[in-house]
Image: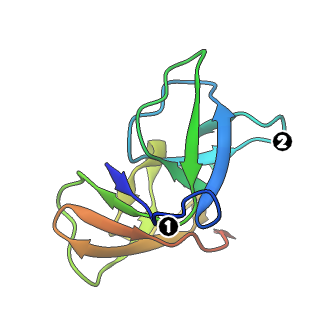
């Protein structure tokens, strides 16, 4: 689950988009040039542009956010940098191939403060 500031329309929202595949709640997403969302993927070089609040199924559209607290995760550590992993996942292990992209910091064992940085090609 993602929580967001009360004035979500003016602060933190990436936008409302259709998807190319089902995107589970809390996952990191990549905004394609055609305006569709897909799962971001560091090893495949698909940078993260935000995260979704709730699951978006194929044929539907949903909101993506660039600033939020992402909750409902597991295995996170407070104060530890989070990188983009495979299939829209967060990882605490810096990548060695694809792209390196910091996407936030752990704020609890089940939460990350989303903070999307520019990707670096490895």
- Residue 33 numbered tag: 2
- Residue 48 numbered tag: none
User: Can you name the residue that lies furthest to the top here?
Assistant: 59
Q: Quadrant of the C terminus?
A: bottom right
User: Which circle, 2 or 1, is nearer the viewer?
Assistant: 2
Label 2 with label 1: CB-CB less than 8 Å = no
Q: Which is more toward the observer, 40 or 112?
A: 112
Give the percent coordinates (x, y) of residue 18: 66, 28
Q: In which quarter of the image is residue 92?
A: bottom left
Give the percent coordinates (x, y) of residue 19: 62, 28
Q: How crowded is mark 2: few (under 14 residues within 10 Å), some or many (20 or more)?
A: few
Q: Earlier in the sequence, mark 2 or mark 1?
A: 2
Q: In this view, does 94 lie to the left or right of 58?
A: left
Question: Which type of secondary structure does the marked residue at label 1 adopt?
Answer: loop
- Real-space CA distance between mark 2 and mark 1, rounded to the nearest whole angstrom: 26 Å
Q: Mark 1 points at which residue?
A: 96
Give the percent coordinates (x, y) of residue 116: 57, 69
Give the percent coordinates (x, y) of residue 84: 48, 60
Give the vertical position of 111 relative to 19 (above or below).
below
User: Can you name the residue that lies furthest to the front here?
Assistant: 7
């Amino acid at each position: 689950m993602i929580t967001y500031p009360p004035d979500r329309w003016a602060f933190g929202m990436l936008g409302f988009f259709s998807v190319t595949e089902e995107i589970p709640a809390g996952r990191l997403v990549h905004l394609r040039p055609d305006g569709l969302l897909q799962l971001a993927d560091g090893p495949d070089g698909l940078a993260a542009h935000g995260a979704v609040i709730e699951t978006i199924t194929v044929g539907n559209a949903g909101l993506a956010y660039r600033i939020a607290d992402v909750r409902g995760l597991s295995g996170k550590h407070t104060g530890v940098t989070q990188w983009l992993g495979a299939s829209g996942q967060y990882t605490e292990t810096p990548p060695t191939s694809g792209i390196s992209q910091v996407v936030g910091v752990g704020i609890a064992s089940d939460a990350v403060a989303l903070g999307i940085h520019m990707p670096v090609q490895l």
